[in-house]
Image: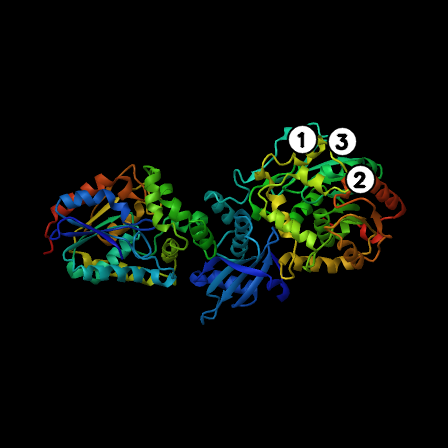
Amino acid sequence: MAFIDEGPREGRPVLLLSGNPTWGYLYRDFIGPLASAGYRAIAPDWVGTGYSDHPRVDAALTLAHHVADLVSLLDQLDLRDFVVVGQDWGGPQGVGAALQRVERLGAIVLMNTWLFTGLLSRFHLSPRPWTTWHAPLAGQFFMKRHKVLSHHGPSALSRRGLSEEEARAYHHVFDEPDSDHVVLTWPRTIPMREGDRGWGDMQAIERRLAELEAVPTLLLWAPEDVVFPIEHANRLKELMPWAEGPILFDNAAHFLPDDRGPEVARAVVEFLDRHRGDRS
Amino acid sequence: MRFVTPCEEELSCLRGDPLLVEQELDVRPEVAEAVEKAAGFRAGRLWWRSEHDHLYALELGDLGRGRPSTATLYGFWDRFEPRPPEHEIDADLLAACEWIAGLSPSMNVSDIARVAEHARIPTGWGEGSVLRTPEERFANLPGFPYAARSVEVEGLRIAYVEHGAGAPILMLHGEPTWGYLYRHMIGPLARLGRALVPDLVGFGRSDKPAAANAYSIRSHVRWLGGFIRKLDLGDITLVCQDWGGSLGLRLLAEMPERFGRLVAMNTGISDGRARGEAFLRWRRFSQRARSLDVGRLMRRTLAAGRLSDEEAAAYNAPFPSSEYQTAALVFPRLVPIRSDHPGAYDNRVAIERLRALDLPVLLIWGAEDAITRSGEAHLRSIFRNVAPPVSIAGAGHFIQEDAGEEVAARVADWMKATPRSPRATARPDL
């Protein structure tokens, strides 16, 4: 598992957690501001993405595995009073890991993500393109043979429009044949119905959210996102009524940390500064 | 989906290429169950031929879960050739995905094509992948006043000329020529029927895919079959030479109901037996060559015929540069010279079908032709209803050029004396 680790060693660790089909590069606008504000910015690449190993085995890329990988990172770096910042899969995987080290968790920032079953956007329910993109065999055709999501997802969903270099930076880690397994296993882990892979793990996270009541939580949201529209922020707010926000960002879509990087980073720093040492 | 059961003999000539590897087919259990129901098993291979005539298999595996859990989709290709163009594979895989979507209660067939469109997955010839010889190269061809017509098959323009009316007389040229080769025969034969002379894909005025893997015996047969179906030809008298015969005989085996008579000249259908030294020399030469001067090659090969400079230029007209010659450079390599060549297997199947036909056959051979000398006896052994042999003295491999008028006269005499096989004249059922 590869990670970026910038800023003062003794600074409060802020874990910047990306989702499908991105990697640590998503948070490039966050590292500098966090580090200069005295925080230790850590951006791990989930196993299967970025500069981490890319196993070619479906079973190594489940929600439970990703959570276990992050727990291991928390332990190996011996991170204390850490902050989870998560977008997309960074939400459930980050919070899922934090729940296993809840005594060391300092704060949570969630952006366009979800931590529950039972509410899915039209995007995720729609056969076109989403469920068709990752259907059995069709998924192998679209996602792996043609790399539709890994190579075109970020630029297609970007609100601001990526430069060619930025688009290439996102997908170059998936250029090798068969290196993009996670791009297919992630959609297949989205729990749509009981019995789906990820259903039980997601429900376990949802059930335990109440344990986080003392943890300062912030919701930052791009309401224009079709993947996790504002209803998902509202649902999170119901489940975590202590959360601040959602602070809404226009001119942004699914990849909020990319679309409005500097502004969102500033909001995170401001929030963390206000809650310095709340739980220590 | 055209499901088939390939035989061991064919499979032993092919290599399997995993195209889609599904580790967890039962990530959507209803799909796994639907596939199992359609296949009739939860572990095994389901085979089909695509619209491009490629062979595919879906291999299901049960990892002890009581249903198909893994699925690997293989393409099976000629062991001695590169795999076919990717857009053909993409189109075939999309068709397979649509089949699965149609089985599954949780998927819509129409979504596959729409998602593919959304993702801009090309299922046709890409920009720049097909060359077309500029029209002006064909201006003022000596002795060839016929207007070019064309039909489109699989996105490729197949050019042909047409003269006369009545039952079609289909003349197929071979390597490395084009319809121009038949110019001495079109006029005389057009008095007996509708003379039709197409250019093979990659030759003459037809479109020319630039990549070598576009060309195989199967693809040529498919394209010519498309030509015949597009023009809805029936009651055909097939006149063919060289590759025109090797391909034409495959067409005859595939759609015998459309053919009434056969005139084969200096040609053959290889079952994979060793070839004569003259052919192997030509094969070696052609596979080393980066380009062919067809006019010069014709002049060197002709036994009696003499080409004017303009006529020699007409043979080079289709090829402004060697880029345009892929089909011509590939052809010699496609002749099956080993029995484990898939083309040899396909030809053996075709030969068995040809044995069952009783259509009238005329074999005309150039006495000086070294390249296809053995073909005459072979074809004589295949067909039942063969006219007495016609050997043209002083004619070589390009018999239409060496002795076109004489050959046309012999064909015309035979046609007048030979009614088309009544059994084979039934209109095809489209």
User: Are the residues flagged by discs 1 and 3 from a single subunit?
Assistant: yes
Quick one: A44 or B64, which is closer to the camera? A44
Q: In this figure, which residue is indicated by the disc labeled 1?
A: B138
Amino acid type of disc 1?
Answer: Phe
Q: CA distance from mark 2 to mark 3?
A: 12 Å
- Disc 1 crowd, CA 10 A, few/some/many (<14, 14-19, 20+): some
> Dot 2 corresponds to which residue?
B404
Helix, strand or loop under label 2:
helix
Q: Is residue A3 left or right of residue B331?
A: left
Q: How is the image coloured?
A: rainbow
The answer to whether marks 2 and 3 sit on the same chain is yes
Q: Relative to residue B169, is residue A15 depicted above or below?
A: below
Residue B99 location in percent, x, y?
55, 55
Q: Is residue B97 left or right of residue B1?
A: left
Kind of residue at disc 3: Gly
For disc 3, the marked residue is B143
Q: Amino acid at mark 2?
A: Gly
- Is B305 on the left or on the right of A88, as rendered? right
Residue A212 position in % (x across, y down): 19, 57
Q: Quadrant of residue A247?
A: top left
Which numbered disc, 2 or 1, marks the residue closer to the eye? 2
Chain letter of disc 2 in the image = B
